[in-house]
Amino acid sequence: MSQPTANGTAPWAARLEDRIPPHLDEQIEIYETQIAQKRQGKIDDKVFAETRLRRGVYGQRYDNGQRHDGIASRALEYPCGDLTKGPNTVWDAPGMLRIKIPFGAMNGEQMEVLADLAEEYSDGIAHVTTRQDIQLHFIHIDDTPDIMRRLAAVDITTQEACGNSVRNVTACPMAGVCRDEPFDVSPYAHALTHFLLGHKDAQDFGRKFKIAFSGCEQHACGLANMHDLGVVAQVREAGNGTSSGTERGFRVYVGGGLGAVPHQAKVLREFVREDELLPLAQAVCRVFGRLGEKRNRARARVKFLVAKLGIEEFTRLVDEELAILPADERWTTYLDDLSVTDEEPTRPAAALSPGPRPEGFAEWLGSNVQRQRQPGYVAVAINLPLGDLTSTQLRALADTARRYNGGHVRNTVEQNIVLRNISEADLPALYAELRAVGLGAPGASSLVDVTACPGTDTCKLGISSSRGLAAELRKRIAASIKTTGVLADEAVKDLRIKVSGCFNSCGQHHVADIGFYGVSRKSDGRTVPHFQVILGGQWTENAGSYGLAVVAVPAKRIPEAVERIAGLYVAEREKGESFQSFIARVGKARVRQLLDDLTKLPTYLEDRTLYSDWGDPREYTIGDLGVGECAGEVVTAVEFGLSAAEREVFQGLLELDRGAAEAAAEKAYAAMLQAARALITTENIDIGTAPEEIVGEFRTRFYDTELFFDPYAGAKFANYLFRVHGDAETDSGEEAHRRIEEAQLFIEAAHACNQRISQAQVAGTLRRAV
Amino acid sequence: MNAATEAGLDDLVKLDLKVLASSDSAAAPEEFIPVFHRWITERVLPELLIDVADYSHVHEGPGVLLVGHDAIYAYDQSLGEPGLLYSRRRETSPETAGIRTLDQRLESLLLCAFRACDRIEAEPRLDGRVTFDRHRIELRVNDRLVARDDDTVAALESAFSRALSAAGVGNGRGSVALERIGKARERLTFRTA
């Protein structure tokens, strides 16, 4: 099923056979089979949507086959006809691929592969996200298995990058080199990433689940307070004072999150030892999977569960789960080698020597370079405009990183990239290299370094052009700095501006000093793009507080609004007064008054420019809004299990087609076992994979209780399983054919059984088996 | 059977063609945003056009893109040399669906790229400020499955040279001289010498 080969060479699957880790290879094979099934109409739209989302394959704006050109909505006639890749999502429509980069760490080889993929399948741009991922846009779904293979060959996965799953685990990009951290959180983020990836206790969520690590409490670092699970490094005296020294551990937060309704996380544990972290995270996943909202996705994040139960009750439930968790050696084995994520300097530490400097060096040094804990070394931030860099830049960066630090970089949640372990003496040469490829812009993590989500550029939920606004703000701020305008003032230099295209906060506007999110307003019978101005948010102290909306301003007037707010702060702040304190003192009413005239719109005929958005000449409309895929499709674990059984029987069909009767019969049997196991998981999540155990449990829970019995055919379908279980092997083509048919009927019966159980649960009439 | 067919290059779809802008061209990439939006609205090209993407903020990047289903058009800024980039990804439009050989494909690539160049040069919004040098052309093989052995490279170069000559590049007389550019790990790229 691989892509046709060019030049008669082996396709990627064959070429990379020896380089792809088996667990990733299996996932990609499954996905490729699902693509084939979908093309043949053998997999449900909703199930396929969730399964591709869990592999990072996302929809993009206009993928419903409609596009508003400013005059009217017109059909985009994709060649695939009515083939879809999810509800209202056309197969051929370009999509986005989200690539997980745990704690943002990439090496040179990985960067080169990402550069190649961006050129060959995307638009030549790699985009760094606010979760340290890399995203590629305008991807065709048919290309995704090969892309995944090429990524897997350099140990990168897209698995669970989207959908209702554990998303990319983020961490402070300074972890390991920070002067304030008690220890490096990187190996713990690495361990938790791999522990929860594909974990059975993290497959049945109603929404996504985000985890962040931070080395300290005081800086923004991992933004622990705005995560479903926030983990902050701590040390304490070891062993109740009976032994000497300190022990490592973490303060663990739960239930934080931004979105439309932001929640500050609550402390779940003041201190968990390092060996307790993974089981604690697993227990939290279990509680969330079991009790989290599934039907109403608007209230399905763990923050709502924590709010509903209260942190005390939530903690009690987690403790209960912890007490019954089956022991898992992976909880602690990783502790034997915490150096797995280490990045050692490759150049000798040396001070910056006096001498001639390249143009712009001093400014760059002041804004983009930070001293490390290790004497003589610094971390260098690369300020990426809107998180974008070209394939050429990414390749050049790989070379530069290899030259100066062994080839390591970290993506940041501010959509930048950090080079660590740089010898101070190398800074002028490094700067010259970065500057030569357009990566030497100053102002990283400052006012000019505006963060933005994709917004209306590619997101189906985008209301206003967050990237368009961010690009414009970058230009204006840079110009103001050059002409020593108000935005050049030292007081505002380090303020953060963050822009989201809608209220969902992917641009993290709630924790910016000045945040914006896209809204629309009606005026003169037309719709006008606006942004809500958010003030009072706090970036430091791990996103210490959330801002609130002050007033909605037309999109085209936001730059003016920024200048006015900054001007007010510059003019009226008290000595040493932070921006948050200043806003709290002068009050939001004052700011609203300051911006009031900007909210008054001229008529369309007086000034049409306000009726279109930044970077988009079309007359503004919200007609392109679609159903977002951030939330994923709510597909239960049992549905996934049944889908896997369908895939297995489909592969059996293929075996039968090629005359492999024995293999076909084996697939049919395996499919029935998978379907039975899927049903059992509704009652026993810890069910194993041994056929004897599955059949025994199935008999007890679904046969003896008659739950599996068809209203008309009774035990007929259940007996298919029992019969084949007693006599699994056959090389008869006729028998294999029959078993494939029986397996298909068994799976159908399992679907029907699941539906009956669900209905009975709703009606409160379910008779439990045991 | 010609050398390209023999080298298995007839299945090679992912190709980029860049026609460099004349040295006196003077337009910012952002100026292409309304142009490309209008092309979508007015369906000026015989293929499905979907969206416009603005990367003008990126250093020597793809500039502004017109994203189609089968191909991406861009006023590309790579290597600091503006030009019209035509990047073919698929062949589903009536105009390209029947292509079977590399020779046909290269002919089609040149046709599509030159047609876009013609339109840009005639674009009222750009006021004649962008023109293209149709003798300075680059071909990038956007598929790393393609082998780089001497026979394959020679077959590609020869096919491209023939296609250029047939399209009137280099005065249409004889083969057009090409040079290979870029590093070994980069895409296989030829440019008119």
Image (spheres, rainbow, N blue to C red):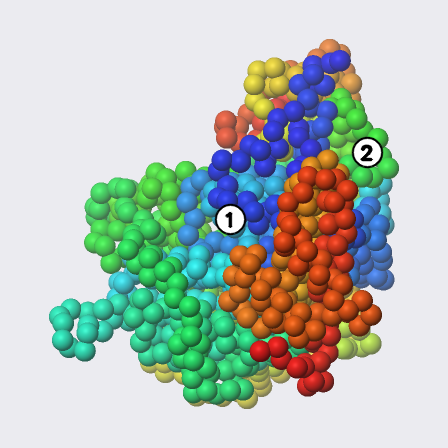
Q: Residue A296: x percent and y percent? A: 66, 78
Question: Which image quarter: residue A612?
Answer: bottom right
Residue B14 quadrant: top right
Tell me which amino acid carries mark 1.
His
Instruction: List x then y, in percent, for residue A119.
Output: 59, 40
Read off the residue under disc 2. B96
Q: Is residue B152 visible?
A: yes
Q: Amino acid at mark 2?
A: Thr
Q: Residue at x 32, y 49 (%)?
A: A343
Left or right, A10 with respect to B11, comes to: left
Toward the viewer: A69 or A688? A688
| Relative to A304, A335 lies left or right | left
Specify the quadrant that holds the C terminus of chain A: bottom right
Question: Pointer 1: what residue?
Answer: A23
- The image shows residue A273, relative to residue A291, as above or below, that is above
Picture quadrant of residue A295: bottom right
Residue A455 at x, y percent in the picture: 64, 63
Q: Is the residue B145 above or below the residue A541 in the image?
A: above
Which quadrant of the figure contains the N terminus of chain A?
Answer: top right
Q: For numbered disc 1, what is the local secondary structure?
A: helix
How many residues crowd mark 1 within 10 Å: few (<14), some (14–19), many (20+)?
A: few
**For residue A290, above or below residue B151:** below
In the image, residue B17 sits, relative to residue A242, either above or below, namely: above
x, y percentage for residue A463?
68, 68
Residue A218 in sight from this viewpoint? no
Per the model, the C-alpha gap separating discs 2 and 1 is 39 Å
Q: Nearer the viewer, residue B27 or A194?
A: A194
